Amino acid sequence: MSRTDQLGNFTPQDAPDYGDVLQCMRCGFCLPTCPTFALTGRERSSPRGRVALARAVAEQQLEFTDAVKHEAFFCLDCRACTTACPSGVRAGEVMEICRSQAHQQYPLKHVGKSFREFILQRMLPNPALLEKSMLPARLYQRLGIPTVATVKWTSDQMLRRLLPQGHVPEHVDPSGRIAIAEMPVDPGWIGHRIRDIEQATGGRLAYLTRLGEGLLPDSDTVYQEGDLLHLALQRDDLATAERILDAPPVAP
Ligand code: SF4
Ligand code: SF4
């Protein structure tokens, strides 16, 4: 089948084939096969929903927003939907291309980029280096230290640097209005009090993760390097808060 180009709000390099996207007839046969739809029950986290998102971006009804980026990385690329689809739509492939688009449209900052290049180009192809990187985990294991939280914190830190920047929604209240999200924070905020962050964003810090341990902040708690912030906000304010925290604090 020949390629059909309609870029819309995609960048020209590595854009999804518009013809592929148009093949979806919204029958829903793919829905029961998709693990992320089974987990969330959210249409946009289903193959049909993801293809609809890509189509909306191609038809300029939607910018390549955070929601599109999030769905691209949330897709497991398991391709279970492909075999169930009577039209031959390859939602996993479309999302793979959207991940490439996310890297183009939300480029990593310098530190994250260097870290990713180090992991992908130097550490993974080098078994000796990979072996050495596992030493701390083995040491924890030998000492019998309960490391579940620490390992999660470590993997969160790694993922933060491997994936494009962006908040990670963790909880939404039953009305759908309030969300708790893990927010990326510019290093310029290190040393600032949590209340400064709350005042700047209009949110409330639900808790923070410091070296793998959950911590309930008080008004004098100071944001430290490596802390993960879990901020409670009105959902509509998430993007604005992300923009504020993604830049150094504005001097009073
Ligand atoms: S992706 Fe395929 S199975 Fe799913 S709704 Fe579209 S046409 Fe139907
Ligand atoms: S490839 Fe993505 S969209 Fe398709 S079933 Fe797997 S998780 Fe769902």
Image (cartoon, rainbow, N blue to C red):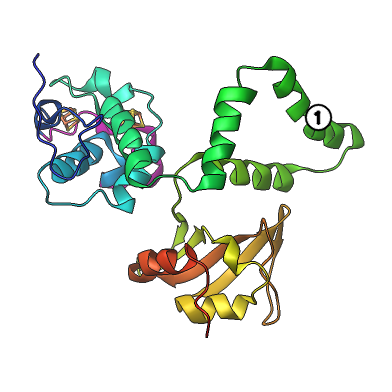
Please name the residue shown 91% across and 37% down the image. 143
Residue 95 falls in image quadrant: top left
* Residue extent of the magenta highlight: 26-43
Q: Position of residue 99 (x, y in %)?
A: 35, 35
Q: Nearer the viewer, residue 252 or 53?
A: 252
Looking at this rendering, what residue extends furthest in the right direction?
143
Q: Position of residue 239 (x, y in %)?
A: 36, 64
Residue 75 falls in image quadrant: top left
Label 1 CB less than 8 angstroms from ligand 2: no
Residue 187 colored magenta?
A: no
**Which residue type does callout 1 highlight?**
Leu
Q: Nearer the viewer, residue 216 or 27?
A: 216
Q: Is residue 173 visible?
A: no
86 displayed left or right of 227: left
181 displayed left or right of 87: right
Please name the residue shown 61% across and 22% down the image. 124
The quarter of the image holding the N terminus is: top left
Looking at this rendering, what residue extends furthest in the bottom direction?
252
Looking at this rendering, what residue extends furthest in the top direction?
1
